[in-house]
Each structure stands twice: as structure tokens, then as C-alpha cells.
Amino acid sequence: MPKVSEEYFENKKNFIIDSTYNVCLRKPVGMVTMVDVIEETGLSQGGIYRFYKNLDEILSDMITRMRVDYNFIDALESVIKNSELSFEEITYAICDILADVMEKHLMDIQKINFDLTVLAINEPDRAAAIIKGTKGRGNFEYLASVVMPMLVEASGKNELKPLADPVDILKYISASYVGIEMNCILSACYGNGVMDVDVKPKELFKVLAKTIILLFGGKID
């Protein structure tokens, strides 16, 4: 293979990632094949394999790119670091951020994230290998490792009395987030929400915020 510049190499890889992303918008990620990517790029099979060994390597780099484009960590940290906010205000602010990001990216990145969750259920080993190849900090890893424990800490500082074990409340929050995501994706991308209704992220996250506050023993308006 003739030598190429680093810039040329990166540009080609970015082109392949862009093409894969476009395919993933049209098809469930678990159904995307290398043939789909080759057809989307217009490159030959040999041309693709000059830059990537397999499809999962491309998906890893695509997810790394998505972590940059779909990043709400900075917004969450600005809320967490604001010591003047009450537990209730923190909870509302976090849920507002999650709703805004989900609504903005419902038809693109959020749809792909949902497909990746399905892939993880059906092919856990493959999904784990794809994620292992990614770089950067994921939004949901941050939610689980930082934001949720912070809610417990904030409730303690406000001397609230949770109605259940905080660990169980965090499990409930996680399950609720997945449920909101699933219903919004099915409604927006596939036209078939679980309850066959038009679901909106902002409305559902507002209800979730109120539920979290009540479960931790706080007060709602």
C-alpha cells in the first residue's frame, strides 16, 4: 500500500464514519452490514479494509464521535457545582437538560443509542467489544457514576427523608430513563410507542423530576 499522509488517512476514516452514521440512521444498528457501508461510501471492499479491519471498529469510532457531538456532561456539571441550588432545583435542572438533549437528537443520535442498547441485549459480547474500542467518557456512564450518587448526597444535605432505600430509588430512576427513551424513540422513529400515544421528552422528564423529588422526601410546586 503506498504511503499516504496522516491527514488523508484521517479524512478517509471520517468519511467512512460519516457514511456508517448515515446508514445507522436508516437501519437498526444491529442490522447494518459492511456491505451497507461499502455501498454508502462508494469505495471498494479493499478500499474500506485499508482503513478498518471490520464493521465493529468503525462503530467504535462512530460512537467516539457521537460522544463529542452528544455531550451533556458539561451542562450537568454546571448544575452539580452550583451550591446555591436546592435539591428540588437540582433535580428539575438535570431532568430539563436530559429532556432538551433527547428532544434535540431524538431522530439521530438518540435513535442510534437506542439501537445500540438493543444490540447489547441481543449480542452482549459484540456490544462490549464495540464499547471497549471507544474513547472518551460516555454521558450515561457519567450519569450512573456521578449524577445519581450526587442526588443521594444532595438529599442528605437538605435533610430529606427518602420514602425508600436510595439505592432502590436510583434503580427506579435508571429504569424510568430507559422507559422514557424507549417510548420516545418508538414514537418518533418507528411510529409505534408502547401506549400508542404521542410522547414528548419534556413532559415525561418533568413528571420524572417530580417523582424523584417526592421519593427522596422533597416538595413539589
Image: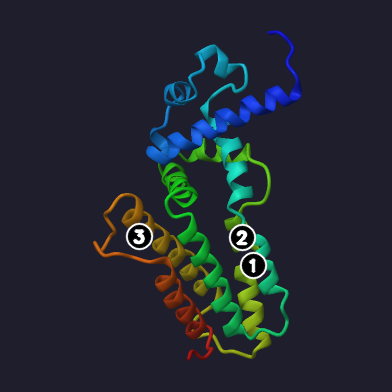
* Image quadrant where one finds the N terminus: top right
Query: Vertical placement of 72 versus 61: above or below?
Result: below
**x and y percentages locating residue 153 in the rendered image:** 66, 78
Q: Position of residue 146 (x, y in %)?
A: 66, 65
Tell me where residue 130 appears, x and y as whole percent: 56, 37
The amino acid type of the residue labelled 2 equals Phe
Q: Nearer the viewer, mark 3 or mark 2?
A: 2
- Viewer-nearest residue: 214 or 110: 110
Local SS, label 2: loop
Query: For residue 87, what is the image quadrant?
Result: bottom right
Report the Cα–Cα distance between label 3 and label 2: 21 Å
Q: Quadrant of residue 15?
A: top right
Using the image, tell me which numbered label, if any, was put on residue 204.
Answer: none
Residue found at x 68% / y 28%: 10
Q: Residue at x 44, y 64 (%)?
A: 175
Q: On the image, numbered disc 2 is attached to which residue? A: 72
Per the image, the residue denoted by label 1 is 76
Q: Is residue 219 above or below residue 128?
A: below
Q: CB of mark 1 within 8 Å of CB of mark 2? A: yes
